[in-house]
Image (spheres, rainbow, N blue to C red):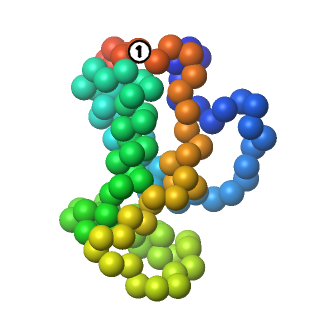
Amino acid sequence: MTGACVPPPQTPPIFRSVPDRATALLMNRFLSNLRQGIGRRVALKEAQDYIRTITVKQLQQSKFGRSILAELENALPQTRQLSETDQPLAHPYFWGAWICQGETKAVQLNRL
């Protein structure tokens, strides 16, 4: 598939559990960017930057964000209480597996 954003094919598969809701947040932001006419490479980079920099306070403002925090709390060992300014998704574990290959220009998305 030309222009797909997928894990790189030369990278051996990594069988680890990545929190589903954090991935959904990344993909939601990516698709929102595409719908705005942003090129695929830039749309993905912006979505990754968004995930890296989103704070606990921002996540606490939505039901979905609170579910992400709950998922993280259950999945990852916490050595300390998170503060409102912490960026709990900043580690590449949450956003680094995604790259754009092929055509990176804007794509026309049709709504079904």
Q: Nearer the viewer, residue 2 or 81?
A: 81
Q: Is residue 1 above or below residue 36?
A: above
Hey, which quadrant is residue 48 in on the image? top left
Q: Is residue 57 above or below residue 99?
A: below
Where residue 80 appears, x then y in whole percent? 46, 85
**How many labels, in total?**
1
Which residue is situated farthest in the bottom direction here? Answer: 80
Residue type for callout 1: Lys
> Quick check: 1 left or right of 52?
right
Question: Residue drawn 56% across and 73% down?
Answer: 76
Q: Nearer the viewer, residue 76 or 81?
A: 81
Q: Which residue is mark 1?
A: 105
Which image quadrant: the N terminus? top right
> Quick check: 89 left or right of 77?
left
Q: Is residue 110 above or below residue 13?
A: above
Q: Nearer the viewer, residue 35 or 57?
A: 57
Is residue 23 visible in the rendered image? The answer is yes
Question: Residue drawn 50% across and 14% down?
Answer: 103
Hey, which quadrant is residue 6 in on the image? top right
> Disc 1 on helix, strand or loop?
loop
Question: Residue drawn 38% across and 79% down?
Answer: 82
Which image quadrant: the C terminus? top left
Where residue 110 appears, x then y in whole percent? 31, 18
Neighbourhood count class around disc 1 (C-alpha, 10 Å): few under 14, some 14–19, many 20 upward: some
Where residue 2 appears, x then y in whole percent? 56, 14
Q: Is residue 91 above or below residue 38?
A: below
Question: Residue drawn 38% across and 64% down?
Answer: 87
Is residue 28 visible in the rendered image? The answer is no
